[in-house]
């Protein structure tokens, strides 16, 4: 059904046609912009009014009109480019009657070019005195009201383009995200890592515990998955001798949406030959601290209601010790499945059929009693073997593996392993995953026989880690929801 235009939209369309009647394209052409708003304001904020007049400095900017105060023969307006706003003074005496009348048809949201001289107003604001005014683009829809903006959060995410126009905080996050990613890349590149790309489409469900998105390859007539992790291909590269590799890429999990989860998200996995769990802890601590100081210029952050301090050495604690601190139960001692099930029952913890092992029950206790208490950066290590199918066994206690998760403000931010490189052990773990699937675990992995073959050629001892890049950016930009750091989060369709 055709949408009915508002009175304002009808007026703007009429203005567009009037601009066209003047011989001007209402939707613009190339404009040779020379300057950006914040560069000009920073360069001349401390220069006195009279000195600016004497220096006769030229500037040429372009941007969206965000404010207009139209007067008789002279007016003020503000344009905003990607760096921020700058004030413009325009007078009929400087631009002529025809150009000034064109300006008088301008609306908030129009995009224009301005060339002129730098000046300061009586209040000391850096301003461009317009000498050339160029209409570039007519906005056919009005912007939201200045003081209300997009108040509906769903609408902010759905119409991100309007949110970025109106909301300086959203713009700041949008520009900080690539700066953080570039900082990560520089950090790893300087340490000898190589950034690689691996396939998004895969024929096997491997590398993580998650429900997949399924698609179909028509030519091969085969179902395929969108990857749920990056792991196995990167470890194949360790076998091939690349030794230190990482990938930052989109990953897909067919699961629910909440402030911490989006069905498509950005993951980074890092693998380093001849390293281990301790090496991954040191790498992670140093990387977070470098982002904090180089991009954010601070080491404390207000994240999910807590003041998080990234400086210094971070806490390192085993899963069983953390559980014992909170509940008094010592899962480090040997116990039967029946004893563990009895403890779960006494604590009202529901155990699914595929979780009836001591290791799964330990993890259920952790999730119930400990996870949300880990506020300051904490490396939690020593996971049960049942929940870590790709991780090397702890040589001192094979019930557990050499793995850690990084928790900040009660949420997992990274997951690291001393990588399993024994092909016989790996095949047994894959086979146990298939057995779990038979018991109802929809997230269990397939057996990747080609990966087993790769391991049989010999993979060097290695440390590996996966980071949720979106959660990392939530921390550094102090945002409460993953949707605040994704430019286009997954949304329900409007008709729902």
Image: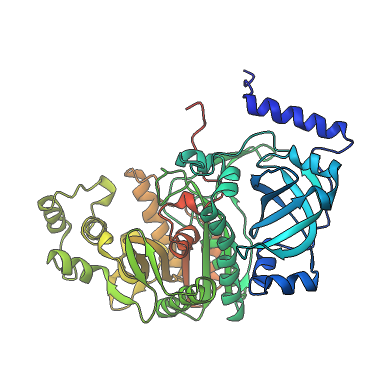
Compare residues 383 and 353 and report the one nearer the observer: 383
- Residue furthest top in the image: 1
x and y percentages locating residue 334 in the rendered image: 16, 68
x and y percentages locating residue 36 in the rendered image: 71, 62
The answer to which image quadrant residue 332 occupies is bottom left
Lateral position of residue 156 relative to residue 318, left or right: right
x and y percentages locating residue 469 in the rendered image: 50, 61
- Whether residue 402 can be seen here: no
Residue drawn at the location 14% of the way across and 49% of the way down: 348
- Residue furthest right in the image: 23
Lateral position of residue 191 relative to residue 299, left or right: right
Lateral position of residue 323 relative to residue 213, left or right: left
Residue drawn at the location 56% of the way across and 50% of the way down: 487
The answer to which image quadrant residue 420 occupies is bottom left
x and y percentages locating residue 324 in the rendered image: 16, 68
The answer to which image quadrant residue 218 occupies is top right
Please tell me whether residue 187 is drawn above or below residue 369 in the rendered image: below
């Amino acid at each position: 059904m055709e949408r009915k235009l508002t009175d304002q939209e009808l007026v703007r369309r009429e203005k567009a046609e009037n601009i066209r009647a003047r011989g001007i394209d209402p939707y613009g052409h190339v404009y040779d912009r020379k300057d950006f708003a914040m560069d000009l304001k920073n360069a001349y904020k401390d220069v006195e009014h009279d000195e600016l007049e004497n220096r006769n400095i030229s500037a040429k900017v372009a941007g969206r009109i965000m404010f207009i105060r139209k007067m008789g023969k002279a007016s003020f307006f503000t344009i905003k480019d990607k760096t921020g706003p700058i004030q413009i003074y325009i007078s009929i005496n400087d631009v002529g009657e025809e150009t000034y009348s064109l300006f008088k048809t301008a609306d908030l949201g129009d995009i224009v070019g301005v060339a002129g001289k730098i000046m300061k107003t009586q209040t000391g604001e850096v301003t461009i005195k317009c000498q050339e005014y160029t209409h570039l683009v007519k906005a056919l829809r009005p912007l939201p009201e200045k003081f209300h903006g997009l108040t509906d959060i769903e609408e902010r995410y759905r119409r991100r383009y309007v949110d970025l126009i109106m909301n300086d905080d959203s713009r700041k996050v949008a520009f900080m995200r690539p700066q953080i990613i570039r900082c990560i890349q520089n950090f790893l590149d300087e340490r000898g890592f190589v950034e690689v790309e691996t396939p998004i489409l895969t024929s096997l469900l491997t590398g993580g515990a998650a429900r997949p998105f399924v698609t179909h390859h028509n030519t091969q007539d085969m179902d395929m998955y969108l990857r749920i992790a990056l792991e196995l291909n990167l470890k194949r590269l360790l076998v091939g001798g690349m030794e230190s590799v990482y990938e930052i890429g989109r990953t897909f999990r067919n699961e629910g949406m909440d402030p911490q989860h989006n069905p498509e998200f950005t993951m980074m996995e890092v693998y380093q030959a001849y390293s281990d769990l301790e090496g991954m802890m040191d790498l992670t601590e140093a990387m977070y601290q470098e982002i904090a100081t180089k991009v954010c210029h601070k080491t404390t952050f207000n994240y999910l209601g807590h003041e998080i301090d990234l400086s210094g050495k971070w806490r390192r604690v085993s899963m069983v010790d953390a559980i014992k601190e909170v509940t008094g139960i010592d899962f480090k001692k040997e116990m039967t499945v029946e004893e563990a099930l009895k403890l779960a029952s006494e604590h009202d913890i529901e155990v699914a059929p595929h979780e009836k092992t001591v290791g799964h029950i330990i993890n259920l206790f952790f999730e119930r009693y400990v996870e949300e208490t880990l506020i300051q950066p904490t490396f939690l290590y020593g996971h049960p073997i049942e929940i870590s199918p790709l991780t090397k066994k702890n040589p001192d206690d094979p019930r557990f593996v050499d793995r850690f998760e990084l928790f900040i403000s009660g949420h997992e931010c990274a997951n690291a392993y001393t990588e399993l490189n024994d092909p016989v052990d790996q095949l047994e773990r894959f086979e146990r995953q298939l057995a779990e699937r038979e018991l109802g675990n929809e997230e269990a992995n397939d057996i990747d026989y080609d990966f087993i073959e790769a391991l049989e050629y010999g993979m060097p001892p290695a440390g590996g880690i996966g980071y949720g890049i979106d959660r990392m950016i939530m921390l550094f930009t102090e945002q409460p929801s993953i949707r605040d750091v994704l430019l286009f989060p997954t949304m329900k369709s409007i008709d729902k």
